[in-house]
Image (tube, rainbow, N blue to C red):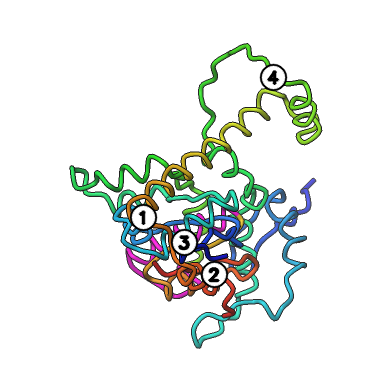
Amino acid sequence: MVRGGVAKARPAPWPSLVLDSEGLWAVARNDSEAARAALSASRTAGVPVVVPSVILAETLYGDQRDARANQALKNLVVLPTTEQMARVAALLKRQSGMRGVKATVDALVVATSIDLGGGAVLTSDTGDIDRLAAVFAELRIKAISV
Amino acid sequence: MAQPARKRSTSPSGARASKTATEPNRRRKAAIPQSTMPVVGAIPTPDVAEMIGEIRIAAGPAFSAATRLKVAGMNTAFEKEKHSITLDKPIVEQIRELFGARPLSASINDLLQSALVQHRLGLLVDQMEEEAGPASAEAFNRVFSQWFEEE
């Protein structure tokens, strides 16, 4: 597995990888080894890496500060948030007892993962993602820390 | 003569669900063992099972749509452009075998979309690794252990 101290990418066991705001920034800034490992494993397994469109609204500045994020986004899939996903997110929020804008965005991230049949979520906020994902135990959705 | 009132499919929370939405989901619901019903926080809510049902209804076709992203990453029907291309016969045979009666153009379109998504991800990973080096074995272990970790 290890060649000259460098790990050979193992295939990801998750069926999809969704990035939240911190996940996207970790990829854009390229300052997280965990993010590199998660993306590399996803590539090896042929797993889609997805950014929910709502994350763009939360993350981007709308000016030149977005250059690195835009560079990364060029090579990622941005998945539009549908009405269906929004409805799922509302139910997740209600059931988990979470409130507020941040919870709404997190719930949309989890709803996106549900839409993809479950998978990993690259985030700095593993607690909230896992709490929302726990509402829907039928699918395996796990937060992975950046 | 007055017609008898039709029975409506109504969830316990009062939300009416359409027949098409409830029937496939009834099957899925039956597959969930009661022990997996989530209890969030310290307050077990009495309508958890119904809530799960509601989420399943709302998620609806998403369950068959794991493949959705595999190919397109979105639901949008794009404008089409007609081309005449030449393919290897064995490739065409394999595609027909994989996709059955599905139109060949749509199948090839999906496969190309999927390949492009993966190609672009590869470009990004290569670029990241060029800048900062590949992730260490420890980083892979940390990431994988979070996925396999039980609740």
- Magenta: main secondary structure equals helix
Q: Are marks 1 and 2 on the same chain?
A: no
Q: Is residue A30 left or right of residue B34?
A: left
Report, in whole angstroms, how far the alpha carbon at label 2 lies from the one at label 4: 40 Å
Q: Is residue A40 above or below residue A124?
A: above
Residue underneath mark 1: A27
Q: Name the amino acid, label 4.
A: Leu
Give residue A125's position: percent from left, percent from top: 38, 71
Report, in whole angstroms, how far the alpha carbon at label 1 lies from the one at label 4: 37 Å
Magenta-tinted stretch: A93-116
Q: Name the amino acid, label 1.
A: Val
Neighbours of disc 1 within 10 Å: few (<14), some (14-19), many (20+): many
Q: Nearer the viewer, residue A82 or A42?
A: A42
Secondary structure of residue under mark 3: helix
Tag 2 and tag 4, C-beta contact below 8 Å: no
- The residue lying at 60 percent from left, 77 percent from top is B38
Residue underneath mark 2: B144
